[in-house]
Every structure is written in C-alpha cells, then in structure tokens.
Image (cartoon, helix red, strand yellow):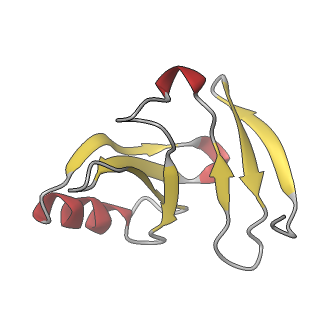
C-alpha cells in the first residue's frame, strides 16, 4: 500500500515496524494493544528533526501537555510524547537531542 519497505525491530523489549525513511520522513508502527481506548489509541510520530525540545516547549505554550519528556530510543534517536489541546497523543521524533 505504501510502496516502501517496512521492517520490524525490537528495542528495550518493544517490537515495532519501521517505515523506510532514507529519503526523508518515515515513521513507525508501535502496537500496544493494552492501550487502545478512546483516550489513548494510535500513537502518531511527527518529525521535528533538530528541534525536539523547542517542539515540546511550543506544545506547552499552546496549552498541550507533556506525557513523556524527551528520551533516547536507541538507534532511532529521541522522542517525547505530548497531548495536544484536542486530546491526541503525538510522539515528537528527532535523531538529535536538540
């Protein structure tokens, strides 16, 4: 469907499918069946390359919340999980901790 390679990997006991991203934005699918509900559900990763900490601060300034602060995710870079003002969980992702 996507016309790109999707590979599976494990890190820290978590299994995920990584979408090919050699030419720019990619993504991953991170299933957590025990978290699927009306308030949790799908976790969408958004690329904030080179400005993850700025993106977290802008989330707060706009009235959102930080659910998980910036943390390393091994060879995949860094992520933070935020809740936007509409109640959507979003993973902010960057290869750099900046």
- Residue at image point 44% right, 69% down: 48
Could you tell whether 36 is left or right of 33 in the image?
left
In the rendered image, residue 76, in percent from the top left (x then y), is placed at 63, 51
Could you tell whether 62 is left or right of 19 in the image?
left
- Residue at image point 42% right, 43% down: 71
Residue at the front extreme of this rendering: 38
Residue at the bottom extreme of this rendering: 23
Could you tell whether 33 is left or right of 7 in the image?
left
In the rendered image, residue 37, in percent from the top left (x then y), is placed at 43, 29
- Residue at image point 66% right, 22% down: 13
Q: Which quadrant would residue 21 be assigned to in this image?
A: bottom right
In the rendered image, residue 67, in percent from the top left (x then y), is placed at 29, 39
Q: Could you say which is closer to the camera, residue 80 or residue 62?
A: 62
Q: Which quadrant would residue 11 be assigned to in this image?
A: top right
Of the 4 image quadrants, the one containing the C terminus is: bottom left
Q: Could you say which is closer to the camera, residue 59 or residue 74?
A: 59
In the rendered image, residue 55, in percent from the top left (x then y), is placed at 30, 66
Of the 4 image quadrants, the one containing the N terminus is: bottom right
Instruction: Decide: is 8 above or below 13.
Output: below
Q: Could you say which is closer to the camera, residue 32 or residue 52?
A: 32
- Residue at image point 27% right, 48% down: 87
């Amino acid at each position: 469907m996507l016309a790109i390679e999707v590979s599976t990997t494990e890190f820290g006991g978590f299994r995920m499918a990584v979408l090919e991203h050699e030419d720019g934005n990619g993504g991953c699918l991170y299933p957590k069946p025990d978290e699927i509900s009306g308030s949790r559900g799908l976790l969408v990763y958004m690329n904030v390359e080179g400005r993850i900490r700025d993106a977290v601060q802008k989330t707060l300034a706009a009235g959102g919340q930080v659910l998980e602060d910036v943390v390393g995710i091994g060879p995949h870079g860094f992520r933070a999980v935020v809740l936007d003002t509409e109640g959507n969980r979003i993973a902010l992702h960057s290869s750099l901790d900046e």
